[in-house]
Image: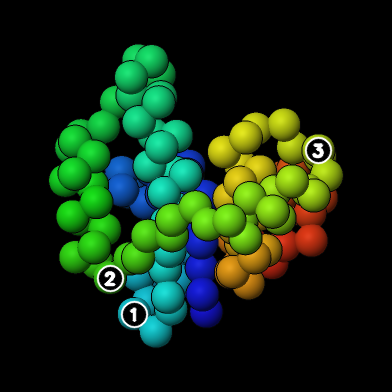
Amino acid sequence: MKLLLDTHILLWYLDNNPKLPGNWKLCIEDRHNSITVSMVSLWEITIKVSLGKLELQDDLTAVENILRQQGITFLPIRTAHLLRLSNLPFHHRDLFDRLIIAQAQAEQLTLVSDDGMFAAYSVSLLD
């Protein structure tokens, strides 16, 4: 499977948070799956840290290194993603989530998120 982690799933995974369903954690850790994190998530995390709404145990560089060591790749923002975003219905108002949805659609990735609003979009979601 080719999975794209939503920001909160990434944070839950990094924190070993029990909110992350066990079967999702197994999918993330399964080396047969291709796991991707959007640069949008790192951007969102950076903004939340700078606003004091989020604390990280490690700095962003350390987080990036940890993820790379685990074989997780990073998805940059491409023109195709922005074109997809420009036509995305406004079921969801969060800019970061909308861009992650557009990326999942454009790259044909299965999104890992527990955000109920994502189901309103034509996007593959991990069960």
User: In this view, which residue lies farthest toward the front?
Assistant: 79
Residue 47 in sight in this render = yes
Residue visible at 72% across and 31% down in the picture: 93
Q: What is the distance, in whole Å, between disc 2 and disc 1 at their CAs?
A: 8 Å
Q: Residues within 10 Å of mark 3 (few under 14, many from 20)?
A: few
Residue identifier under label 3: 90
The correct choice, above or below, for 86 with respect to 124 in the image is: above
* Residue 111 horizontal/vertical position (percent): 59, 60
Mark 2 and 1 residues: CB-CB less than 8 Å, in contact? yes
The quadrant in which residue 71 appears is: bottom left
Mark 3 and 2 residues: CB-CB less than 8 Å, in contact? no
Residue type, label 2: Gly
User: In this view, which residue lies farthest toward the top?
Assistant: 52
Residue mark closest to the camera, 3 vs 2: 3
User: Element at badge 3?
Assistant: loop
Left or right of 77? Residue 125 is: right
Q: Who comes first in sequence, dot 3 or dot 2? A: 2
Residue visible at 33% across and 65% down in the picture: 72
Q: Who comes first in sequence, dot 2 or dot 1? A: 1
Residue mark closest to the camera, 3 vs 1: 3
Residue type, label 1: Arg
Residue type, label 3: Phe
The correct choice, above or below, for 10 with respect to 124 in the image is: above
The correct choice, above or below, for 69 with respect to 113 in the image is: below
Left or right of 50? Residue 93 is: right
* Residue 76 horizontal/vertical position (percent): 43, 56
* Residue 90 horizontal/vertical position (percent): 81, 38
Q: Who comes first in sequence, dot 3 or dot 1? A: 1
Residue identifier under label 1: 31
Residue identifier under label 2: 71
Residue 21 in sight in this render = no
